[in-house]
Image: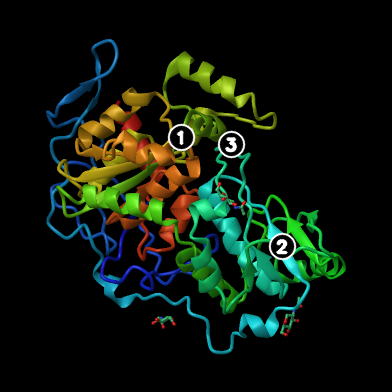
Amino acid sequence: MALPRRRHQPHKRARFLIPTISAVSAVLVLLFFCFSFLVPSPTDIDHFHHRRHYSSMNDGDGDGVGVGNGVPVFRVPTSGGVYDRDIWRSKNAQFYYGCSNASSKFAKAEDVTRPNRYLAIATSGGLNQQRTGITDAVVAARILNATLIVPILDKKSFWKDNSNFSEIFNVDWFISYLAKDVEIIKVLPHRRGRVWTPYTMRVPRKCNDKCYTNRVLPVLLKKRAVMLTKFDYRLANKLEMELQKLRCRVNYHALKFTDPILELGAKLVQRMRMNTKHYIALHLRFEPDMLAFSGCYYGGGDKERRELGKIRRRWKTLHISNPDKGRRQGRCPLTPEEVGLMLRALGYGKDTHIYVASGEVYGGEETLAPLKALFPNFYSKDTISSKQELEPFSAFSSRMAALDFIVCDESDVFVTNNNGNMAKILAGRRYAFIYINTKHLVELVLSSH
Ligand SMILES: *[C@@H]1O[C@H](CO)[C@@H](O)[C@H](O)[C@H]1NC(C)=O
Ligand SMILES: *[C@@H]1O[C@H](CO)[C@@H](O)[C@H](O)[C@H]1NC(C)=O
Ligand SMILES: *[C@@H]1O[C@H](CO)[C@@H](O)[C@H](O)[C@H]1NC(C)=O
């Protein structure tokens, strides 16, 4: 999906807000996009227009990007990417405004928080998954009329990061911003002069407010301090509006990165804008793990089958019937090449600057080559910062992810090939979505190879 950023509004309040998981969205521009290349005048994406079809993007005599055996497998279309309209903003953006403020009926925290009810949580997953957990924890504490202890971050996830909450997020801001909604304290008080260890339990996935009062409240009343572990997606998507608004206040206002992260993030954004007015941020997930888990086949022959097959054995229950079919049905992550062609077709030309946030890309430079050929102004945090600047962050995956988050968030257009946590959170701040018909796109790319 491609998400144009609403630029007109000030940073803090001007977000159109949807909760991280459920989508309370004012306008959902669902565009089933008929794919075309070499189309000289892309039409306005704010409207539903049909496009002409071209079955091949190799008609032009573009530069070939040769990979292996001297056979060019990818040719850069010479045309496409013509600006005849403003592809950097949405006409209707000015009509949208943030709406996460509580109504006057929403009781103040001091009036609902009961004494001796302490809720602690331990998050799970990477930075953005943890962020959704933190957001839900605040709402869960509110449902239980409990005092929340500053969440404990996951240090053992796949991404292994030892940072605690206050090293990623501005903890004092978090506490004070939410003071009217939920009482939050940094650590559990001592009990009878001793360190107090909360009772640990888990709640089911997508537990709603009734589920919290039925399952957690009785334990909380008895033990007085409860720690909910592996706290991810533990709160229902659907909640009453005031609680959804609280979710938005947490995610989009209360969770602010620490100053060192914000400072370097701002520098990176400034560097992206040094040579260009607008830029696209691409969150590209194309790691070997992810591809293995997706069960998709990308045409890499026996080598790919062997390599991804080896990783697949990690998941005993993973059942892959027909990897080729998945891709043809548009159910696989788009390749860097496919993302590049999609952007070209949307009207972004070769001179567009693109910031790529990605982990290890399967196939490395070879896989990225077509995208780089389409968009030679290709950047990442490693290319626009020095080793010294990154040094305080590079050993901490969440801090590195936070830098990417900032550059993506500040971009004029955000594009992703996945529908993960980061994409969802960033999408919640933007007003227009375009879903691309990936089935169509993959068919075109396959038929042209
Ligand atoms: C929300 O509340 C803040 C702080 O009280 C205020 O500055 C802002 O204008 C409000 N936003 C809206 C849309 O009412
Ligand atoms: C929380 O407080 C409100 C307001 O006093 C009350 O209506 C609600 O039942 C309480 N919920 C719990 C779980 O204590
Ligand atoms: C978080 O880490 C910092 C630095 O390592 C440390 O000073 C602080 O006490 C830690 N806070 C918690 C709550 O563990």
Q: Which mark is residue 327?
A: 1
Residue 52, can we see it? Answer: no
Q: Which mark is residue 342?
A: none
**Residue at image point 69% right, 28% down:** 316
Q: Amino acid at mark 2?
A: Leu
**Residue at image point 55% right, 63% down:** 22
Q: Depth check: give the residue in front, 372 or 11.
A: 11
Q: Which mark is residue 158?
A: 3
Q: Amino acid at mark 3?
A: Phe
> Residue 391 placed where, x, y %?
39, 37
* Among the two numbered marks 1 and 3 on one chain, the one whose residue lies closer to the N terminus: 3
* Among the two numbered marks 1 and 2 on one chain, the one whose residue lies closer to the N terminus: 2
Helix, strand or loop at disc 1? helix
The vertical placement of 313 against 318, above or below, is above
Cα separation between marks 2 and 3:
28 Å
Q: Would you identify the image quadrant in which residue 38 lies?
A: top left
Nearest to the eye among marks 2 and 3: give it.
2
Helix, strand or loop at disc 3? loop
Q: Which residue is mark 2?
A: 188
